[in-house]
Image (cartoon, rainbow, N blue to C red):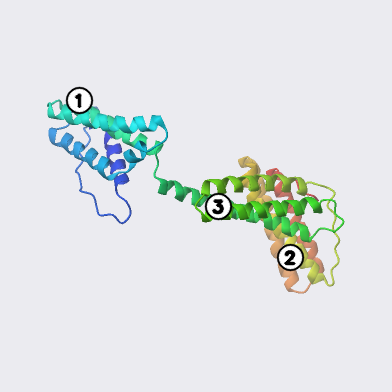
């Protein structure tokens, strides 16, 4: 038996066992031949392979899914599996062990290929659920960034209308996607979230790189101003992983940005200690320097930010 055949055998055995099901009958695989050997498998081994394939055809839903597929090519491949298995049985009964084993190896390979072409709906849904959850988290992060940005903007800011439009658009798409997900329509939900994420990042990039953003800072105490600067710092901090994921910078750019982030963290810790000691004015200056290093890290990743 070839190593490829043994690998296919073990792989397909794992496909037949569903979680919580009773254990399948154990079939002892023949050991591989020595390096360079071409020893023919015994009649008993080939008979075991026939039993294996029969078990796969009866317990696995792969061929059934192929038969019900709307794709003619997948249907044809499912039918080819059954035809080859019948031919292998016939060849085995005629005593041609070498040819029977060759056909059985083809059947095993074809079953594996068919399982990829006609995947299990439960597995597809699990993958879609995971992708959906990932996108929801990303879109919610963008929404939070817009909302934090809006808090710092003057009512007269020319970009305020754009920010409001982005917040509303993201909210609508997120709600529509969540409604679809409740009906297990994950593919459509993922499509909406993909659009929301892509558009949100693109518009956020434009807004962050605009020089016309204006702010009106009116703080009653230095402590209040420090809290404002801390919120501003966190907003830039949240953009770091988003920029890495969406802009796909080079490894060199990522390493350089990480250095700036680390330097920023050192200054952030210093600012916190200064604020805790009651020296908020010094803490504000230190925190602003930390924010500048985060902005440099973002620009290194390809995301332009205002000074």
- For marks 1 and 2, the one nearer the N-term is 1
Q: Position of residue 51 (x, y in %)?
A: 19, 40
- For marks 2 and 3, the one nearer the N-term is 3
Above or below, 23 relative to 77:
below
Q: Are marks 1 and 3 in contact (CB under 8 Å)?
A: no
In terms of secondary structure, where does tag 1 sit? helix
Residue where numbered disc 1 is placed: 99
Closer to us: 294 or 97: 97
Disc number placed over residue 72 in the picture, else none = none
* Crowd tier of the residue under label 3, counting other residues whose Cα lies within 10 Å: few below 14, some 14–19, many 20 or above: some
- Which residue: 82% across, 70% down? 222
| Of labels 1 and 3, the one closer to you | 3
Viewed as shown, does residue 112 lie left or right of 189? left
In terms of secondary structure, where does tag 2 sit? helix
Residue where numbered disc 3 is placed: 180
- Which residue: 71% across, 69% down? 273
| One can see residue 196 in this view | yes
Q: Quadrant of residue 233?
A: bottom right
| One can see residue 2 in this view | no
- Which residue: 31% across, 41% down? 11
* Crowd tier of the residue under label 1, counting other residues whose Cα lies within 10 Å: few below 14, some 14–19, many 20 or above: some
Residue where numbered disc 2 is placed: 271
**Quadrant, the N terminus:** top left
Above or below, 13 relative to 35:
below
In whole angstroms, how far apart are the C-alphas of marks 1 and 2?
77 Å
Viewed as shown, does residue 18 lie left or right of 305? left
Q: Are marks 1 and 2 in contact (CB under 8 Å)?
A: no
| Of labels 2 and 3, the one closer to you | 3
- For marks 1 and 3, the one nearer the N-term is 1
């Amino acid at each position: 038996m070839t190593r490829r055949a043994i690998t296919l055998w073990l792989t397909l055995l794992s496909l037949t066992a569903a979680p919580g099901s009773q254990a399948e009958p154990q079939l002892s695989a023949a050991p591989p031949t020595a390096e360079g050997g071409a020893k023919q498998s015994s009649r008993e081994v080939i008979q075991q392979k026939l039993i294996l394939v029969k078990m796969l055809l009866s317990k696995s839903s792969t061929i059934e899914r192929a038969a019900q597929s709307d794709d003619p090519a997948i249907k044809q491949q499912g039918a080819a599996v059954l035809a080859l298995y019948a031919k292998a049985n016939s060849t085995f009964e005629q005593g041609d062990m070498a040819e029977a084993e060759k056909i059985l190896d083809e059947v095993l390979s074809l079953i594996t290929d068919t399982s990829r072409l006609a995947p299990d709906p439960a597995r597809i849904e699990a993958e879609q659920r995971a992708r959906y959850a990932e996108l929801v988290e990303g879109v919610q992060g963008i929404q939070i960034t817009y909302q934090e940005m809006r808090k710092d903007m003057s009512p007269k800011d020319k970009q305020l209308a754009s920010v409001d439009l982005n917040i509303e658009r993201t909210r609508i798409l997120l709600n529509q996607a969540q409604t679809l997900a409740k009906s297990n329509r994950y593919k459509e939900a993922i499509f909406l979230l993909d659009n929301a994420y892509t558009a949100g990042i693109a518009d956020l990039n434009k807004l962050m790189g605009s020089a016309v953003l204006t702010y009106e800072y009116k703080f009653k105490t230095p402590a209040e101003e420090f809290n404002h600067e801390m919120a501003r710092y966190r907003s830039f901090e949240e953009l770091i992983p988003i920029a890495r994921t969406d802009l796909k910078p080079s490894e060199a750019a990522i390493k350089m940005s990480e250095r700036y982030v680390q330097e920023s963290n050192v200054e952030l810790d210093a600012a916190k200690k200064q604020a805790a000691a009651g020296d908020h004015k010094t803490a504000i200056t230190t925190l602003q320097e930390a924010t500048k290093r985060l902005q440099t890290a973002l620009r290194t990743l390809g995301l332009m930010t205002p000074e």
